[in-house]
Image (spheres, rainbow, N blue to C red):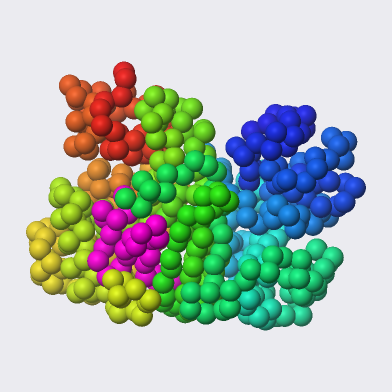
Amino acid sequence: MPASPSDYYAALCARDRRFDGRFYVGVSTTRIYCRPVCAVRTPRFENCSFYPSAAAAEAHGFRPCLRCRPELAPGVAPIDAAGRYAAAAARLIDQGFLSGQSCEGLAQRLGISARHLRRVFADRYGVSPVGYAQSQRLLLAKRLLAETALPVTEIALAAGFGSLRRFNGLVRERYRLSPSELRRTAPAARAPHGGHGLHLRLAYRPPLDWAAMLSWLARRAIGGIEAVHGDQYVRSISLMHGGKRLDGWVGVRADASRHALSVEPSASLVPALPLVLARMRRLFDLDASPGDIAAVLGDLAAPRTGLRLPGAVSGFEGAARAVLEQQVSTSAAACLLKRLAERFGEPVPTPWPSVDRLFPAAAALACACDEDIAAIGIPRQRARALRLLAIEAAEGRLDLDDVIDVERGLARLQEIPGIGPWTAGYIAMRAWSWPDVFLCTDYVVRKRLPGMSPGAIDEHARRWSPWRSYAVFHLWASDAPPAP
């Protein structure tokens, strides 16, 4: 990050994409704030002030630029402990946590004091959790007004506002425009609501190797749950929102010209759009900073700087996949997961014949017996590990979605019989999107680093911290060992 206002201004003048989403600039003459990549004429230095988040800029009285659209800026993946707490709080807020609970309840959910939460959150985002929540709701509503033809009432509810009157009042107060005026200033290319008509953009920092991502997902696609059709990834998805379960589907394509993904959710998921978008960001690792990662990995990452860390749409799905991928080939694991979905997953309608089921819920597997699970073609011991994992998740004793203390989480996973260091580490990499896990006992990793013991490999990999998870993926994708 820049160290001084003059450094921020230099990044602004260069329109450096490495800083997109890392800071925002408020212009005193217009009272508008922008992303550092905004194409408008660069303001004078003395008219600029810099903020760590869009919410902080709005808290200082600035309204979002209608040209660069701050709500489309990519996110930032934290690697330090305080950043993880702040980011986890932000994720829960984005999912609507503060709509029904207090800041104290959010702190309790994270296992820290409310005072500590406010401190780390202000350090990261420059605003209180409540202020951040209000800004995020408004920015989502602004995006929906610009990119969809959804009715204003439906947009207000999807963004988390309790009433249309409150929504209209806040939009006028913050943006000095009514919702209908905001919609008129947006591009006219909006498809009708429903079916294939709802498309939203998720930005990323280039490069992103979309072909490599699709290839990875296609080889591991669970029949009936997900598929790759040409340049599009499609899948079913089930979410809990406001105490209700919402089932539907999502299709995702790359929009390379805009450095974004185009996300098409089913109409049934509109009430939970913030959660849908958050899951897609995690699945495709859109908050990654390829330049930062490549700078640490060096020659290992040089041939494939756009390689990302594929995540999971839910912690339980990611964990269950890891258990069934133990000691089998990629194709065999995909076959086992398809059988699991056919036996325990519920049907769901989608536009694609190849996607017609939901991934089995933890509660469904928790209620099954070991013999029923083993019938998909796995050893009884592995079936028991999967059932015990499901029981811990279904009964709320094991958090698989918002893990902050990774070391504790890894230890907790390994208390379940049948889950060892490799499986726990793989869950942390994909289900928790943790960037600094290294699988020193992995077969392919050992093959890429020949003549070294697991301990020596682990020591060797320390040079790649805090991006060792990415190092594993690069080693898996590598044709030859990296230079020592």
Q: Residue at x 40, y 60 (%)?
A: 232
Q: Is residue 448 left or right of residue 257?
A: left
User: So how many labels did they put on this image?
Assistant: 0
* Residue 344: % across, % down: 23, 74
Q: Residue at x 73, y 45 (%)?
A: 39
In the rendered structure, which segment of residues is drawn in magenta? 216-241
Magenta region includes residue 317: no
Residue 167 position (above or below residue 117): below
Quadrant of the drawing holding the N terminus: top right
* Residue 5: % across, % down: 77, 32
From this viewpoint, is residue 416 visible? Answer: no
As rendered, which of 189 and 216 lies closer to the eye? 189
Q: Is residue 23 left or right of residue 388?
A: right
As rendered, which of 231 and 207 lies closer to the eye? 231
As rendered, which of 441 and 479 lies closer to the eye? 479
* Residue 117: % across, % down: 61, 51
* Residue 87: % across, % down: 55, 50
Question: Image quarter for residue 65?
Answer: bottom right
Residue 392 position (above or below residue 306): below
Name the outermost residue toward the right.
29
Residue 185 position (above or below residue 192): above
Q: Residue at x 80, y 63 (%)?
A: 174
Magenta region includes residue 217: yes
Quadrant of the drawing holding the C terminus: top left
As rendered, which of 28 and 198 lies closer to the eye? 198
From this viewpoint, is residue 168 visible? Answer: yes
Question: Image quarter for residue 470?
Answer: top left
Q: Residue at x 55, y 43 (%)?
A: 205
